[in-house]
Amino acid sequence: MVKKIRIGTRDSELALWQAHTVQNKLNELGYETEIIAVKSTGDLILDKPLYELGITGIFTKTLDIAMLKGEVDIAVHSMKDVPTALPIGIVQAAVLERANTLDLLVHKGNLDFLNSKGIIASGSLRRKAQWLHKYPTHQVEDLRGNVNTRMQKLKDNNWNGAIFAAAGLERINLKPDTFINLDWMVPAPAQGAMLVVAMEKDTFTREALAKLNNNEAEICTYIERQFLRTLEGGCTAPIGALAIKNDNKIEFKGVLFSLDGKEKHFIEKSCNFESYLNFGQECAKEILENGGKPLMEKLRTELKVK
């Protein structure tokens, strides 16, 4: 059977860029495609912090429903927004080659505030906790919306800077000259990676997407998301993880923070590329056994994660 592959996406500029990237790759392989854009709950509710919305998967739920109802065949996501447990019937079909994994600070041209008091904006509890750990005298304001909206809010407010994923700004050419790479900040699990999901029963589409899969990105994000899942942290919890392939080894670092950034549990380990299957889980268990477990219990209470 030959069919047109309907690509579901959010309607932000970045999400559409990602969907068009997948579309172009499928078209080059000879597949017929169509893009269908929808608004997600996460894009519509901008006046509340993410963790208050009781979610994991706020940016993916609308597309999950569209897939399950048969309105679209695949969905393209920033992988860091996707819950580690996919809905029944929906499966991971491709992880594209990974982009820049770094977080960066967009500032207003003056960095004096780094040595005194400052106001930084971010809607991510992970970024907020790591910033406050390094700069305890600073204040972190909540910042929501798509990339374009957040850049505009930075201009409109008296903040000294705001934290973004480098990959998002680079993909839509919004990265300004006034930025610094936050190479000391551990990124979100799967940051910089694009994930395509499909219906489990749709063998035609899954076979098409398998041709787009990048093995190294798939394995590294698998480790990071396994680490996240074992800690039982939702997408909004202050958890960072990064796995990098270096020759025949996987180098990993993971971190768990309290919301105020004062408590930190960090791990840095490596494993052979061939023995990665339980590596993320092992790293997470080590953190839990060395003081992380009571912190996770406290976080669940604070974030009302069920």
Image (cartoon, rainbow, N blue to C red):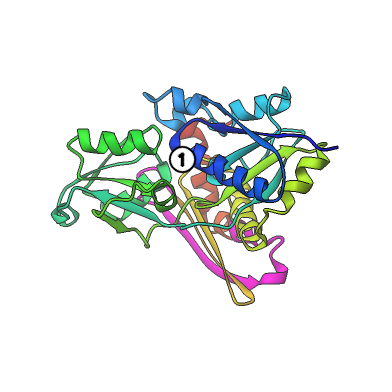
Picture residue at 49% right of the left edge, 46% below the top:
295
Q: Residue 103: x, y in percent?
A: 39, 53
Q: Is residue 189 above or below residue 305?
A: below
Rendered residue at 77%/34% (across/down): 89
- For this view, does 275 lie left or right of residue 194? right
In the picture shown, does residue 112 fall above or below 24? below
Kind of residue at disc 1:
Leu
Q: Which residue is mark 1?
A: 14
Vertical side of 93 occupied by 72: above or below: above
Seen from the viewer's position, the closer of residues 209 and 283 is 209
Image location of residue 113, percent across then percent down: 16, 52
Whether residue 105 is visible here, answered yes or no, is: yes
Question: Residue 42, position in %: x, y?
Answer: 48, 28
Q: State the image coordinates of residue 260 (x, y, percent, origin top left).
A: 35, 44
Q: Is residue 236 visible?
A: no
Alpha-carbon neighbours of circle 1 within 10 Å: few (<14), some, or many (≥20)?
Answer: many
Q: Is residue 265 magenta?
A: yes
Quadrant where the C terminus is found in the figure: top right
Q: Quadrant of the N terminus?
A: top right
Q: Residue at x 72, y 43 (%)?
A: 31
Q: Can residue 112 be found in the magenta stretch?
A: no
Residue at left offset 44%, top offset 49%: 171
User: Looking at the image, which residue sits at the far bottom?
Assistant: 247
**Magenta segment:** 257-284
